[in-house]
Image (cartoon, helix red, strand yellow):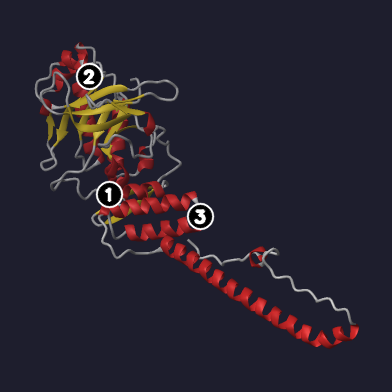
């Protein structure tokens, strides 16, 4: 907040006419007597005037000092930069949020800009205000990296995410999220599975309300580079389709060249050709917690390899898609190169933080579905495939 000068209204300095002593010239019967007393009257009037003005001046100084001290105290309370108390992170976040809200409500634009600048500078060295920063900087994607924050400008020329988080509804009993679009279009329950889920009773899965299933066809080893077929992909595709569930497929990629990406696409196309595939064919690209053969790829490399995979899939007559998570999409890919391709977004939360258009959102890795004995990934599809 800015310290503003204190202006006194002239009316505040006036003395109430009812309380002011009236000074008038006494009546005399005699002109000579009046003339003799005239100097004395003048002196008396001057003395009374001086006393009165002195008292008024003292009153002004007293009131003015009191008002100034109050204003100064208020300003100090509003802009106090530090408190000797050591705050917890939660208390610190709360104070920042309250200060920002107050600045907005009072229309203190300059103060808000100063605060935003300060917060940005502080956030580059400290953590704990991620959600607040994301609210303050809607044109950036913000991530925690160690003890600092990273800012990635949003490309507004790309197709934007139009999903309203307020319209996402979570069933507390099942943990499933649904969505009803403003135009009335509904969402679809989707799961993705692999050999990790072992044997699945797809009839029970269908009865549990699942509409779609995305099934892993295989993967490339992050160490050896060898491509491996998922041992359950055939039975999963056949039994899910038989139960009335529409299916799509995915392949976990570790391609290090365009040629390897095309090889992965051909691997998938060959294995799904006997089946009806209604949902997209996705390339799964994400970080590995251990040393991987793709560690040294550039953002352009990863994006180009994904495009090569998806173009090959499209040429075979399938809908291509790319799967990844928030940090990998924004920090490890060039999103402009992925424009025009369907996106399957992984972000484990009850709401979405992603600026670009998506078709499917994976919101949990620990879902439970009748007919599956293990945890299973839960997704919501915003499209009717």
User: Residue 63: which quarter of the image?
Assistant: bottom right
Residue 181, position in %: x, y? 40, 25
Q: Nearer the viewer, residue 260 or 21?
A: 21
Earlier in the chain: of badge 3 and badge 1, it is 3
In the picture of the structure, the residue carrying the numbered disc 2 is 273
- The answer to whether residue 169 is above or below residue 157 is above
- Name the residue at 48% across, 49% down: 105
Q: Tell me how many marks there are.
A: 3
In the picture of the structure, the residue carrying the numbered disc 1 is 298
* Front label number (1 vs 2): 1
Check disc 2 and report its element: helix, strand or loop. Answer: loop
Q: Is residue 46 left or right of residue 122?
A: right
In the picture of the structure, the residue carrying the numbered disc 3 is 109
- The answer to whether residue 156 is above or below residue 359 is below
- The answer to whether residue 148 is above or below residue 273 is below
Q: Nearer the viewer, residue 323 or 261?
A: 323
Earlier in the chain: of badge 3 and badge 2, it is 3
Quadrant holding the C terminus: top left
Check disc 3 and report its element: helix, strand or loop. Answer: helix
Earlier in the chain: of badge 1 and badge 2, it is 2
């Amino acid at each position: 907040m800015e310290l503003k000068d204190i202006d006194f209204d002239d009316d505040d300095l006036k003395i109430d006419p009812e309380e002011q002593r009236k000074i008038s010239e006494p009546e005399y019967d005699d002109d000579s007597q009046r003339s003799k007393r005239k100097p004395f009257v003048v002196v008396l009037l001057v003395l009374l005037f001086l006393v009165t003005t002195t008292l008024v001046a003292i009153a002004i100084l007293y009131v003015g000092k009191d008002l100034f001290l109050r204003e100064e105290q208020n300003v100090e309370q509003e802009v106090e930069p530090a408190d000797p108390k050591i705050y917890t992170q939660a208390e610190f976040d709360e104070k920042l949020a309250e200060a920002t809200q107050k600045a907005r409500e009072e229309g203190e634009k300059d103060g808000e800009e100063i605060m935003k600048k300060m917060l940005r500078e502080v956030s580059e060295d400290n953590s704990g205000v991620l959600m607040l920063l994301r609210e303050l900087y809607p044109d950036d994607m913000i991530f925690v990296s160690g003890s600092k924050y990273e800012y990635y400008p949003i490309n507004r020329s790309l197709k934007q995410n139009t999903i309203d988080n307020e319209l996402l509804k979570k069933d507390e009993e099942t943990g499933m999220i649904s969505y009803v679009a403003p135009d009335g279009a509904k969402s679809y329950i989707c799961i993705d599975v692999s050999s990790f889920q072992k044997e699945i009773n797809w009839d029970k899965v269908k009865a549990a309300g699942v509409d779609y299933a995305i099934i892993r066809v295989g993967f490339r080893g992050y160490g050896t580079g060898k491509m491996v077929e998922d041992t359950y992909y055939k039975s999963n595709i056949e039994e899910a389709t038989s139960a009335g569930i529409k299916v799509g497929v995915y392949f976990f990629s570790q391609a290090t060249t365009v040629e390897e990406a095309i090889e992965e696409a051909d691997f998938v196309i060959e294995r799904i050709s006997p089946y009806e595939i209604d949902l997209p064919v996705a390339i799964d690209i994400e970080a590995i917690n251990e040393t991987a053969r793709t560690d040294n790829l550039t953002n352009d490399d990863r994006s180009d390899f994904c495009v090569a995979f998806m173009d090959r899939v499209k040429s075979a007559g399938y809908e291509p898609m790319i799967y990844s998570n928030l940090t990998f999409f924004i920090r490890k890919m060039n999103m402009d190169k992925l424009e025009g391709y369907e996106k399957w977004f992984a972000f484990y939360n009850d709401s979405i933080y992603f600026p670009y258009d998506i078709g499917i959102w994976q919101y949990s890795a620990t879902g439970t579905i009748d007919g599956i004995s293990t945890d299973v990934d839960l997704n919501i599809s915003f499209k009717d495939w």
